[in-house]
Every structure is written in C-alpha cells, then in structure tokens.
Amino acid sequence: MHATDTLIVLAATATTAGVDSVLAGHDVWALARVAAATAFAWLVMLRLNHSRATEVFGSGATEYKRVAHATGFAFGLLAMLFVAFQWQGIQPQLLFALPIGLFAMLVGRWSWRRWLTGQRAYGHYASRAIVAGSRDDVEYVIRNLDQNGKSGYIVIGTTVSDDDISPVRVDGRTVPVVGAMSRTAMHAQELHADTIIVASRPDSDPDFIKRLSWELEGTAAELILSSRLTDVAGPRISLRPIDGLPLIHVAIPDFEGGKHSLKRAVDILFATMALIPVAIVAPFIALAIKLDSRGPVFFHQTRIGRDGREFQMIKFRTMKVNAEAELAKLQALNEGNGLLFKMKDDPRVTRVGKVLRKFSLDELPQFFNVLTGDMSVVGPRPPLPREVSDYQGKIFRRLYIKPGITGLWQVSGRSDLSLEESIRLDLRYVENWSITNDLMIMWRTAQVMVAPKGAY
C-alpha cells in the first residue's frame, strides 16, 4: 500500500509537470523542483496523518478521510508557502495533480481493501479473537462480527462472567466458552489469541480491565473494549481525559445546520449529474414497459418523508396496473420483514419489471424527488403511510431526516434483512451519517446494482 501511494503521488506530480512544460513551455527543471516538493509534502502528510495505520485500514470511512485530509493539508500548506514567497509553478499541481492523484489514491486504497477482504475470507490477515463479558454482551459482539473474518477478527472462543460453560450460539454459529472471565489472559495465551475483546466487565470486579491489561503485558495480544453505545453514536464518540479520568464524550445528534446544508448541496449536484444518463436510458426503458404490459410508464406512490410529511414518490412501473387491488389476496404469502410486503415471485410484477427491480433501474426517476427536496440520494428507506401507522417508539427516528434512494439497507441485503436489522441499520444511519459515509454508500450501491442481492 505504501508503494502504491508513492507511485500514484510521483506519477501525478511528474505527469503534471511534464504536460505543463510541453504545453506552456515553462522551465522543465523549475517544474521538476515544484513536482518534487509537492510529492515530498504529500507523502509526508500521508504519513503524519496515519493514513496507513492498521486500525483504520480495511473497514469504515476513517482511512479515506485521512487520505483526503492529508492531501488537502499538504496542498494547502504548499499554496500558502508559494504565495508568501511569490514562487511560481504550483497552480498546475493544484488543478491537476491534486484531484487526479487523490482520486487514484482512493481507488488504490479501495482496491487494497478488496484484496484484503478476499484474503480474510480464507482466514488470512485476520486476528484470532477471544470475547470476554456477560453472555448477552458476548452474543452482541459476535453477532456484529463477520463470521468469515472480513471485519478483521475471527472469534475462536469466549470467556463469560457466569458459571454456564455451554457454547454461545448466535445466528447459526457456535462459539465455545473456554473458561471464566477471571482467567481470560491465561486462555488467550493457551489459544494463541491475537486480540481480546472485552464486551463487558464483571459487576463485582471494577478493576478487571486494568488487571487484564497488566496480565497481557509482554504478549502479542491486543486489548479492545466494546460498547453497545457505539452502535448509535459511532463517529460522535470521543475520549476526553480529565486528570486521569477517561470521560467518553458523546455528541448530541444535530438534524439542522451547515452539515445538512452541505448534504443538500451534494444531493442537488449528484442528482443533476445522474439525470443526464437517466435521460438517455429512460426512452428505452419506457418503450420496454409499454411493449410488455398496458398502463403508464411511471408509477406514483404516496410515501412518508422527513418529519412525517407525505410526498409522491416516482418510479418506473414494474407491476400490473391493478397491483394494489390484488395486494389483499397476497398478504398471507408475505415474505417481507413485517412492515413491508415482499414476494420473491410476486405474480403482479411484469417481465420487464423483474429486470428493472433486479438492477434497481426502476428507482432512477427518484432523482427528480431528490431535486424537489422530498428525498436525499442516501438515507433511510422511504416508508409507506400504513407502515408509519404501525411505528412505535424509536422507529420514529427514521423520519428525522429525508429518506434516500439508497442507504445502508440497500447495500446490506434489502429484502433479505429482518425487520430488526432494517430498523437498526436505518437508525444507525440517522444517528451517524456523514458526507464521507454517503459517498461510500453510493459506491457500494453501484456494486450492488451490478451484483444484486435481496432485490425482488
């Protein structure tokens, strides 16, 4: 990965200098010095910003954020120095090397991540982990770790706070209980574990974590603390030590302000760009719909948006014109997750509709809903009024932001998800969304459209 970053930086800066010398006729040696300085500052900032740290490589948006921040800081610093000393030659690097190099570097990191994920599927480059805590908290951690180690951890055993030594069973997985929590360090050494994940500490032993860290001194084991708080607070969590007291600061969710204005600006930009190719393919889709079955090309349906406001969502029609009237007859065959009706072989879906649904092409007109402000490109799934009428408790938080064309629910299995999992994903997005995560979801959506899962 270090070599990939270096090659990309050198190629972007050197190519920019070379093209500038040919087209503008500037001194090639002066441009070479500027390119060398740019490459040096860029690589140094990537290193100082810990963009290749093992704890951020392989999952999440932090790695991409650090690459972008390091790049921005390096070029910002160079720009200020060149202006202050009235040096020349930095403009081409800012205009060409920065965007091209940053894009190539992000693609390179994504490619390395794909390679790592593939390796972890075979058990390579994944830590052998022991999970310690109460049985309920241990099950929670195991449930949220990939079984094949794609998250970087393969759970090989657990230690629990009670006397029950029966295996932990989660979603069809069976993980052995190797002993009591008080002997976690010893069991980790016996099993050659790389990582100990503490899901919770015994109520009767407030110094358990401190003592465990002492017992692990001199070993290769890594100690990680897990908390259910992170499921709803994720990036809003920060550690604020005060006189040796480690206080966990959780930022209160904000559903207004500049951050949301930026999201709206990104929505308008992305929807405008997307509607260009949509306008090209729309006539062919419309013709296929009309030739396949009688009825209109577009389907309008009332959905619930932010703060419970109704709006008309537009899609390409994928069902017969009398589909809503036939719904009551099919309710007993519902294969959805409870609130949403879904059937893998819904007789109301037309032949063209099946293709459109499989590749999510029926949702392309929703970019008009984004432009009008009813929807966002990324957000929770837009619910039907009858679904909202059944909402209880925390599920209402799905309506705190605009629904999206895509979201965590779409890139995580869509109709194959359980009701609880769909709600958890939507709430996690509402609480923790960011522009960087939105861009990652958009990218993952493009992948899902090519290799659909749970789309019917």
Image (spheres, rainbow, N blue to C red):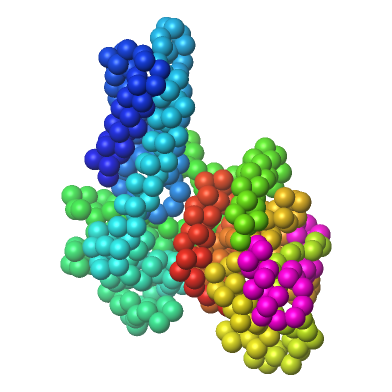
Q: Which residue is pictured at 41% across the width and 11% down the height?
A: 88
Q: Which residue is pictured at 45% across the width and 25% down the height?
A: 94
Q: Residue furthest top?
A: 85
Horizontal side of 94 relative to 124 (left or right) equals: right
Q: Which residue is pictured at 49% across the width and 73% down the height?
A: 453
Part of the protein shown in magenta: 282-309
In this rendered view, identify the residue nearer to me: 400 or 39. 39
Q: Quadrant of the C terminus?
A: bottom right
- The correct choice, above or below, for 77 with respect to 230 in the image is above
The answer to if 306 sits in the magenta stretch is: yes
Residue 338: x percent and y percent? 65, 80
- The correct choice, above or below, for 264 with respect to 120 in the image is above
Residue 155: x percent and y percent? 31, 68
Instruction: Examine the image and state in which quarter residue 86 appears.
Output: top left
In this rendered view, identify the residue nearer to me: 39 or 158. 39
Q: Residue furthest right?
A: 310
Q: Is residue 401 visible in this depiction of the protein?
A: no
Horizontal side of 350 relative to 206 (left or right) equals: right
In this rendered view, identify the residue nearer to me: 283 or 179. 283
Residue 427: x percent and y percent? 61, 61
Residue 439: x percent and y percent? 53, 49
Q: Is residue 299 visible in this depiction of the protein?
A: yes
The answer to if 157 sits in the magenta stretch is: no
Q: Quadrant of the N terminus?
A: top left
Instruction: Examine the image and state in which quarter residue 292 appears.
Output: bottom right
In this rendered view, identify the residue nearer to me: 163 or 369. 369
Horizontal side of 285 relative to 140 (left or right) equals: right
Horizontal side of 237 relative to 127 (left or right) equals: right
